[in-house]
Image: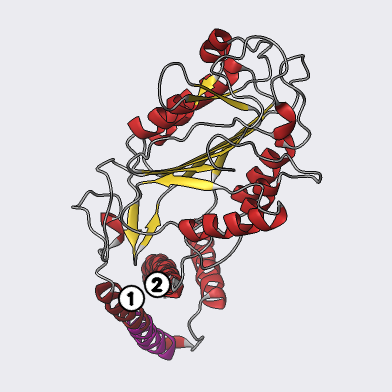
C-alpha cells in the first residue's frame, strides 16, 4: 500500500509538471522523445537570442570604448574619451560617452523665519528649497538625487548637516549643495571677503557673532572638496534684498548694495551665485525667487549640460528682473559633461541600457527554464524508479 501511495504521488507530480510545462504534451514513448527534442530546440533558440543581444551590445560598447559592468567601479587614468573616471575612490564619478555619471547626493537648505531686529523674515526660501528638493528627486531613474533637506535651520543643524554630507560624499558620486536665505560677507582686511550663510537663530549683526555662529561658505566648499568625490555643485541663492541689515555694528558686513564676495574657483567644482558678487538678489513676488524659479525649470530640461543650464538661468533672470540681477558662476570643471536629465546626443547610452536589460531578462528566463528542467529530470528519475519497482512487484505476484 505504501509503495502504491508513493507511485500515485509521483504519477500525480509528473502529471502536474507536464500540464504546467512550457513543453508539448505527447504521450507514452513519443512523449519522452518529443520533450527531449523540444528542450534542445528551445535551448538553441534561447541561446541564439542571447548570442544576438550580446553581439549587439558588444559592438556598441566597443565602438564607445566602454568596458564591461564590473569595471564601472574601478579606477583608471583620466581622459575625455570613452570611459574616464575622475578620482580613485572605490565608488567614483565616471564619464561614459562623454557624460559624467555617478550616484547623486544633495543637501538643500532653505531659511525664512529669521524675524528679528537684524535679519528680516523672507517669504520664499522655504518654498525655493522645497521645490528644489522635489525637482532633484523627480528626475528620471538613474538621475535622481538622494536629498538631505533642512528648513529654517539653526547654526548647529546646518554645520552638522554639512559634516554628514561630506562624509556621505567620501563614498564617491556627485554632490550638490543648495542654499536659499540670508547671506553676508566679512571683508576684514582682505581684498575679497569671506561669505557666511545666516542661520535662523542668528540674533546679532556683530561681525564676530556672524563669523563664528554662521555657516562659512568656504567650510561647505572645503568639506565637499576634501571628500574626494571629484565633482561638486554649490548654489547660493542668498543676500535677498529685503534682508538688509538695519542695526548693530556692520563693519565689514554687507549692507545696502552689498552681497556675497566673489569666490575663488575650485578644481572639480562649480560655484553658482544668484547674482554677481557684491550685489543683492531679489526675493521675488511669487512663490519663488527669480533665480530659483529659473533654475528649477532648467534642471528639468532635457539634452542640456550643466553649463547650458546656468546660461539659460542667467538669460531668464536678467529678462525677468530687467537687468537688475545677473547670476554668475565660478568654475574649474574639466572632463565629461554633467547633465541633470540627459546630455545632447545621449540616446546611444539609453540604447545600451535597453539592450543590457533585454539580455539580463533573457538570461533570467533561461535560468528559470533550466531549473524547471532539472526538477523535471529528478521527478522523471524518481518516477521511472517507482515504475520499475512496481513492475517488478507485479511480475513477482504473477
Whether residue 26 is visible to the viewer of this picture, yes or no, is: yes
| CB atoms of marks 1 and 2 within 8 Å | yes
Foreground residue among 199 and 349: 199
> Can you give x and y, in whole percent of width and height, for residue 320 in the image?
71, 55
Tell me the number on the disc at residue 359.
Answer: none
SS at mark 1 in the image? helix
- The quadrant in which residue 128 appears is top right
Tell me if I can see residue 167 in this picture: no
Residue drawn at point x = 56 percent, y = 17 percent: 214
Q: Earlier in the sequence, mark 1 or mark 2?
A: 1
> x, y percentage for residue 392?
36, 71
Q: Residues within 10 Å of mark 2 (few under 14, many from 20)?
A: some
Q: Is residue 284 or residue 32 the one in the foreground?
A: 284
- Distance in Å between CA atoms under marks 1 and 2: 7 Å
**Is 53 located above or below residue 178 in the figure?**
below
Q: Which residue is mark 2?
A: 352
* Dot 1 crowding, Cα within 10 Å, few <14, some 14–19, many 20+: some
- Is 37 one of the magenta-colored residues? yes
**Closer to us: 97 or 239:** 239
Marks counted in the figure total 2
Please state, as top left, top right, bottom left or bottom right, where the C terminus lies in the image: bottom left
From what the image shows, is residue 355 above or below residue 301? below
Give the residue drawn at x 74%, y 40%.
Answer: 127
Residue at 57% of width from left, 15% of height from top?
156
Question: Image height check: is 231 above or below 34?
Answer: above
Question: Residue 358, percent across and down?
Answer: 44, 73
Snapshot colouring: secondary structure
Q: Secondary structure at mark 2?
A: helix
Chief SS of the magenta region = helix
Which numbered circle lies on residue 57? 1
Query: From which residue to which does the magenta span run?
Result: 29-48
Q: Is residue 181 shown in magenta?
A: no
Amino acid at each position: 500500500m505504501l509503495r502504491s501511495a508513493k507511485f500515485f504521488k509521483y504519477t500525480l507530480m509528473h502529471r502536474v509538471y507536464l500540464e504546467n510545462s512550457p513543453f508539448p504534451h505527447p504521450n507514452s514513448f513519443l512523449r519522452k522523445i518529443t520533450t527531449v527534442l523540444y528542450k534542445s530546440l528551445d535551448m538553441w533558440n534561447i541561446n541564439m537570442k542571447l548570442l544576438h543581444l550580446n553581439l549587439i551590445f558588444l559592438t556598441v560598447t566597443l565602438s564607445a570604448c566602454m568596458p564591461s559592468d564590473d569595471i564601472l567601479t574601478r579606477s583608471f587614468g583620466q581622459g575625455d574619451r570613452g570611459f574616464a573616471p575622475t578620482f580613485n575612490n572605490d565608488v567614483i564619478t565616471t564619464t561614459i560617452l562623454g557624460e559624467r555619471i555617478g550616484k547623486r547626493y544633495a543637501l538643500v537648505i532653505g531659511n525664512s523665519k529669521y524675524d528679528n531686529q537684524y535679519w528680516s523674515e523672507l517669504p520664499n526660501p522655504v518654498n525655493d528649497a522645497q521645490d528644489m528638493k522635489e525637482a532633484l528627486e523627480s528626475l528620471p531613474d538613474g538621475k535622481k538625487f538622494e536629498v538631505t533637506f533642512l528648513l529654517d535651520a539653526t547654526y548647529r543643524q546646518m554645520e552638522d548637516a554639512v559634516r554628514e554630507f561630506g562624509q556621505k560624499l567620501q563614498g564617491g558620486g556627485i554632490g550638490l549643495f543648495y542654499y536659499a536665505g540670508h547671506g553676508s560677507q566679512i571683508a576684514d582686511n582682505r581684498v575679497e571677503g569671506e561669505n557666511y550663510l545666516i542661520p535662523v537663530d542668528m540674533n546679532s549683526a556683530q561681525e564676530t557673532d556672524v563669523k563664528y555662529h554662521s555657516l562659512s561658505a568656504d567650510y561647505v566648499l572645503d568639506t565637499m572638496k576634501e571628500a574626494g568625490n571629484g565633482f561638486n555643485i554649490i548654489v547660493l541663492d542668498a543676500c535677498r534684498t529685503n534682508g538688509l541689515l538695519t542695526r548693530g555694528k556692520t563693519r565689514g558686513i554687507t549692507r545696502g548694495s552689498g552681497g556675497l564676495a566673489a569666490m575663488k574657483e575650485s578644481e572639480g567644482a562649480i560655484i553658482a551665485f544668484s547674482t554677481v558678487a557684491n550685489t543683492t538678489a531679489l526675493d521675488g513676488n511669487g512663490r519663488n525667487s527669480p533665480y530659483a524659479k529659473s533654475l528649477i525649470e532648467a534642471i528639468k530640461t532635457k539634452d542640456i549640460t550643466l553649463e547650458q543650464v546656468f546660461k539659460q538661468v542667467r538669460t531668464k533672470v536678467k529678462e525677468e528682473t530687467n537687468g537688475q540681477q545677473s547670476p554668475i558662476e565660478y568654475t574649474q570643471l574639466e572632463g565629461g559633461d554633467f547633465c541633470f536629465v540627459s546630455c545632447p546626443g545621449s540616446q546611444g547610452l539609453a540604447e545600451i541600457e535597453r539592450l543590457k536589460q533585454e539580455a539580463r531578462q533573457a538570461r533570467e528566463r533561461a535560468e528559470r527554464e533550466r531549473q524547471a528542467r532539472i526538477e523535471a529530470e529528478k521527478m522523471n528519475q524518481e518516477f521511472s524508479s517507482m515504475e520499475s519497482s512496481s513492475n517488478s512487484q507485479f511480475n513477482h505476484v504473477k
